[in-house]
Image (spheres, grey):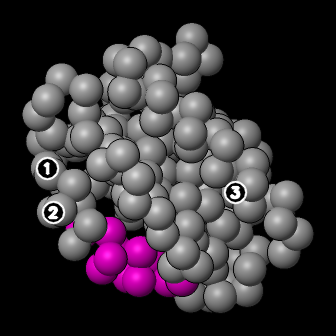
Amino acid sequence: MRPNRLLAPLIVTVVAVALAACGGNSPSASNAGGDNGPSSAANPSSAAASNAGNQGGTTDLQSLANDLKPPNASQTANLSTATTIVVTYTTSDSIASLKSFYDKALADAGLTVMGTTDAGGAFTWIVTNGANTLGGTVTAAPDTSGSGSSVSVAIGSE
């Protein structure tokens, strides 16, 4: 996989986390605060099942993002294209509990953690699937209101 393909979701994640942390919402966000249903551009195939990352090339980014929804969360934005999805959430869970959740959820989704960062109270997982046909980031940051956390899931495919 070309490194540039992995950088795009990372950049989008940073912007999405900033928007979520500020309480802002992109005017182009679809399904904001909604039921986590699929957006029109990000769901080209509903045939891909959970754990599709193990098969090395799911194109059902919305299903993968749904599998990575944090516990006790409300969706705040869902931005997507044919090859990228960024979903942001707010949750009452702490960063520590989200670390435990994502360590398991990422593996269950068939994703490999390529690296992590822990800075300023925020924690980011950098992930790819086995075939390196998709990659992205999951970032959990303390909510600016002082309770709970903001989470951004950004996944892109070739």
Q: In the rendered structure, which segment of residues is drawn in magenta?
A: 101-112
Chain-order first, disc 3 or disc 1: 1
x, y percent for residue 57: 70, 77
Q: Amino acid at mark 1?
A: Asp
**Residue 56 quadrant:** bottom right
**Residue marked by disc 3:** 156
In the picture shown, does residue 153 fall above or below 101?
A: above
In whole angstroms, how far apart are the C-alphas of marks 2 and 1? 6 Å
Q: CA distance from mark 3 to mark 1?
A: 26 Å
Q: Do the residues bearing badges 2 and 1 touch, measured as CB atoms within 8 Å?
A: yes
Q: Is residue 65 magenta?
A: no
Q: Earlier in the sequence, mark 2 or mark 3?
A: 2
Q: Splitting the image into 4 quarters, where does residue 53 fall?
A: bottom right
Q: Is residue 78 visible?
A: no
Tell me the tag on residue 97.
2
Q: Residue at x 56, y 39 (%)?
A: 14
Depth check, mark 2 against mark 3: the one in front is: 2
Kind of residue indicated by mark 2: Ser
**Secondary structure type for disc 3:** strand
Q: In the image, is residue 108 part of the stretch drawn in magenta?
A: yes
Classed neighbour count for the residue bearing mark 2: other residues with Cα under 10 Å, few (<14), some (14–19), many (≥20): few
Q: Identify the residue position indicated by label 1 in the image.
A: 93
